[in-house]
């Protein structure tokens, strides 16, 4: 059985199953069958190489550390933990392999197939990365729910006042003894001219001179 597990073709298949299983888990709301199958394939890989004497406890420890770092990436900011975890994982494969060239080819094939499955899930099947949805805030502050970015002065729409300063086009007006920042519709408005509020767009008050 050990000879079978360390066969180059079997090694490539196990690494590919492991990679595809982990990719499939990105689209699952929780750790499921694909994750268990992928993890089991990687365990078989290390079991065969450990029994054959190619992998030691240090290699297994590095593999476990890599898995833990990738898991911690879900809870830590930045991509440091994920990058270090992926590097540790790949390095542990090289340490466990009998032939660095052969294991490198197997890893490359596994990565290519896993990436192909990843893009197939997104582009063709239209799947979403459910795993990352828990880390992204999708809620929006809507006006209908009572959230406003500023006070909307609809109460002064259509009212008249006096230009306290010259509007070029921005300036200050007075309506019922209240100083209000406003802008003209584009024309130049002299100080003390009569103005009328034509539009209210959030904090933007648009006025027009009353002739």
Image (tube, rainbow, N blue to C red):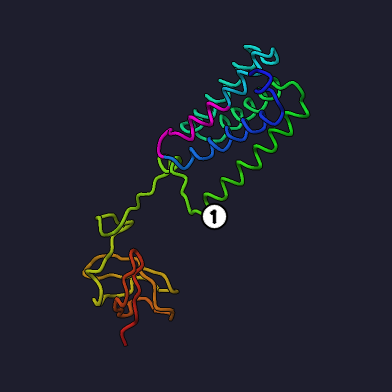
Closer to the camera, 198 or 9?
9
Task: Residue at 39% x, 76% y: name it.
Answer: 184
Task: Residue at 32% x, 88% y: name it.
Answer: 211
Q: Which image quarter is the N terminus in? A: top right
Q: Looking at the rendering, which quadrant does residue 8 occupy?
A: top right
Q: Position of residue 7 (x, y in %)?
A: 70, 25
Q: Position of residue 71 (x, y in %)?
A: 50, 29
Closer to the camera, 184 or 139?
139
Task: Residue at 70% x, 15% y: name it.
Answer: 54
- Main SS type for the magenta part? helix
Magenta-colored span: 29-41
Does the stretch in magenta take in 38? yes
Task: Residue at 46% x, 48% y: name it.
Answer: 128
Residue at the disc numbered 1: 123
Closer to the camera, 157 or 47?
47
**Does residue 46 appear to the left or right of 166 in the view shown?**
right
Q: Position of residue 69 (x, y in %)?
A: 54, 26
Element at label 1:
helix
Residue that protrudes farthest toward the bottom in the picture: 211
């Amino acid at each position: 059985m050990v000879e079978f597990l360390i066969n180059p073709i079997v090694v490539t298949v196990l690494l590919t199953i492991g990679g595809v299983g982990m990719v499939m888990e990105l689209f699952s709301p929780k750790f499921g069958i694909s994750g268990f199958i992928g993890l089991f394939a990687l365990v078989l890989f290390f079991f065969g190489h450990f029994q054959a004497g190619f992998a030691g406890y240090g290699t297994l420890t590095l593999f476990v550390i890599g898995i833990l770092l990738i898991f911690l990436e879900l809870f830590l900011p930045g991509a440091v933990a994920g990058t270090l975890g992926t590097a540790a994982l790949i390095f542990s494969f090289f340490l466990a392999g009998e032939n660095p060239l052969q294991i490198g080819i197997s890893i490359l094939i596994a990565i290519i197939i896993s990436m192909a499955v990843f893009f197939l899930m997104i582009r063709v099947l239209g799947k979403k990365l459910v795993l990352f949805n828990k880390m992204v805030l999708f809620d929006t502050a809507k006006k209908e729910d009572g959230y406003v970015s500023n006070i909307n002065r609809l109460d002064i729409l259509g009212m008249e006042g006096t230009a306290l300063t010259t509007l070029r086009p921005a300036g200050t007006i007075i309506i019922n003894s209240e100083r209000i920042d406003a802008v003209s519709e584009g024309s130049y408005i002299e100080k003390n001219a009569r103005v009328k509020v034509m539009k209210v767009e959030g904090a933007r008050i648009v006025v027009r001179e009353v002739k």
